[in-house]
């Protein structure tokens, strides 16, 4: 039995559904249990994102009591909005809090996981879809480009309420991605947000687009499985989770 700790926004609806679906669909018999600590955030604004980040250490201390095997902090934009490279700072802070409470669990972030997933795919030029307002999407683009990946096009759905983001229909992504110019793109990030549902659309869009399709959630699953030393194979979840990387 593998215990996974999650630090999620208080208004999260999606990470606690998509991640268990992915790991539960694996075919090697591993069993996973999920434990969440919540950090208050209702609206995706710079102020609320900063306030949520300030709660990460408290959330990590609470998770440490459950002795998780790995911990993921799961709000990509909260980290990327703080400026390039901040995922390293956030992961170190959470790791220190866990260690202070006697937990040796490794730590991943959705922000860092997305970069890790793009490196695994050798994707140097990407397009992406976000639910964010355009200024926050620009922050995400700047963060990714600072890591050496060119963003050739980005689509902002401009939904500020985080609960509303979690209630977006993933089927709509099968139309949204067609608004992007994928010329020269090596991969498509269908949801650069763990709260925007996308899992049910990943494989279908990848089959149609002809390039690897991933999301913040599938990248987080990849990072968790890698940290646990388990095969990175999840059926119908895109090339990153094919088990080949």
Image (spheres, rainbow, N blue to C red):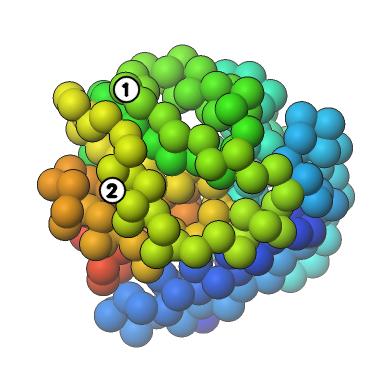
Q: Earlier in the sequence, mark 2 or mark 1?
A: 1
Report the side of 111 relative to 153 (left or right). right
Which is more toward the observer, 244 or 182?
182
To which residue does mark 1 refer?
A: 152
Report the side of 235 relative to 155 (left or right). left
Residue 232 seen from this side: no
Q: Which mark is residue 136?
A: none
Residue 180 percent across, percent down from the top left: 32, 34
Q: Which mark is residue 213?
A: 2
Residue 6 percent across, percent down from the top left: 65, 60
Residue at image point 48% right, 23% down? 141
Residue at image point 73% right, 49% down? 161
Which is more toward the observer, 111 or 125?
125
Residue at image point 33% right, 52% down? 175
Does 17 sit above or below residue 115?
Answer: below
The picture quadrant where one finds residue 55 is top right
Which is more toward the observer, 171 or 117?
171
Disc 2 and disc 1: Cα gap in Å?
Answer: 15 Å
Residue 167 seen from this side: yes
Does 34 sit above or below residue 74?
Answer: below
Q: Secondary structure at mark 2?
A: strand
Residue 142 percent across, percent down from the top left: 51, 18
Q: Residues within 10 Å of mark 2 (few under 14, many from 20)?
A: many
């Amino acid at each position: 039995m593998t215990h996974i700790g999650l630090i999620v926004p208080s208004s999260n609806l999606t990470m606690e559904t998509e991640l268990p679906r992915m790991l539960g669909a694996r075919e090697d018999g591993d069993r996973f249990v999920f434990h969440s600590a919540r950090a208050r955030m209702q609206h995706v604004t710079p102020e609320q994102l900063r306030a949520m980040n300030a709660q990460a250490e408290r959330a990590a201390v609470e998770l440490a009591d459950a002795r998780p095997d790995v911990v993921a902090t799961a709000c990509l934009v909260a980290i990327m909005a703080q400026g390039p490279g901040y995922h390293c700072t956030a992961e170190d802070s959470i790791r220190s809090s866990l260690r202070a409470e006697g937990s040796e669990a490794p730590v991943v972030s959705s922000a860092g996981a997305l970069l890790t997933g793009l490196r695994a795919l050798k994707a140097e030029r990407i397009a992406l879809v976000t639910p964010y307002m355009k200024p926050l999407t620009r922050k995400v683009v700047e963060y990714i480009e600072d890591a050496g990946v060119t963003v050739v096009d980005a689509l902002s759905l401009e939904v500020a309420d985080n609960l509303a983001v979690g209630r977006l229909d993933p089927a709509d992504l099968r139309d949204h991605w067609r608004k992007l110019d994928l010329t020269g793109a090596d991969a498509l990030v269908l949801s650069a947000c763990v709260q925007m549902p996308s899992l049910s659309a990943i494989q279908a869009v990848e089959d149609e687009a002809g390039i690897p399709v991933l999301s913040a959630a599938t990248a987080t699953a990849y990072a968790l499985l890698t940290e646990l030393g388990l095969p990175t194979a999840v059926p119908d979840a895109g090339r990153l989770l094919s088990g080949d990387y």
